[in-house]
Amino acid sequence: MLRKITPTLRRLRGDCQGFGAMELALSMPFLMLLSLGMIDASNLIAAKIDYEQAAQQTTDFALAVRPQSSDGTYLVTIAKAAADVETNDVTVQVFLECGGTRQSDFNATCSSGATPARYVSVQIRKDLDTYFDWAALASTLGIKGFGSTVSVAGDSMVRFQ
């Protein structure tokens, strides 16, 4: 019986057929995770760029149509339309600084020697879902990972006085 098995073992030891398929099978989970990670990362980066550009468009508009008070409601409307987000995802602040110190009243007069500077700050922040549930994978591996929702923000600030 051993005589019949020995030639078969010798033949199998030199046989390399299927070796590439085995390597592919072993590396496939890593390649799939890498691909999913690249897809999620590229989508989040694209959203961040979109929000940054929308915030920049809004501050450019603020330079064209300068605010006369601390009410930036009209800028929220512009940012919301540019970023295609909801109103509560947009934060607009219009404020005055005197000599580098932020003032509570936009229409206040700075003391002598303090340089007045008026600013518009726009921030667009939205929670986006990833395509893959990374939290479930992390818990399976016993490590801490981020959730399946990631907060993405874009902001811009401009001095108009």
Image: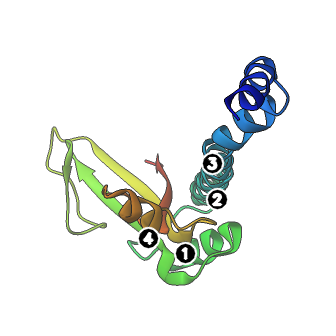
Q: Nearer the viewer, mark 3 or mark 2?
A: 3
- Badge 4 amino acid: Thr
Relative height, residue 10 to residue 150 (above, below):
above
Contact? badges 4 and 2 (CB < 8 Å): no
Contact? badges 3 and 2 (CB < 8 Å): no
Using a 10 Å C-alpha cutoff, classify the residue at mark 1 as few (fewer than 14 neighbours), some (14 to 19) or many (20 or more).
many
Relative height, residue 37 to residue 140 (above, below):
above
Provide residue 40's location: percent of width, then percent of height: 62, 55
Residue that label 1 marks: 76
The structure residue drawn at horizontal position 79% and vertical position 28%, both measured from the top left corner, is 8
Q: How many marks?
A: 4
Label 4, label 1: how far apart the Cα atoms are = 7 Å
Label 3, label 1: how far apart the Cα atoms are = 44 Å
- Badge 3 amino acid: Pro
With 48 as the anchor, is 69 left or right in this view? left
Residue that label 3 marks: 29
Residue that label 4 marks: 91
Using a 10 Å C-alpha cutoff, classify the residue at mark 4 as few (fewer than 14 neighbours), some (14 to 19) or many (20 or more).
some
Provide residue 52's location: percent of width, then percent of height: 58, 52
Contact? badges 3 and 1 (CB < 8 Å): no
Q: Quadrant of the N terminus?
A: top right
Using a 10 Å C-alpha cutoff, classify the residue at mark 3 as few (fewer than 14 neighbours), some (14 to 19) or many (20 or more).
few
Relative height, residue 4 to residue 103 (above, below):
above
Name the foreground residue: 72 vs 147: 147
Provide residue 56's location: percent of width, then percent of height: 60, 51
Q: Is residue 146 visible?
A: no
Relative height, residue 41 to residue 132 (above, below):
above
Residue that label 2 marks: 54
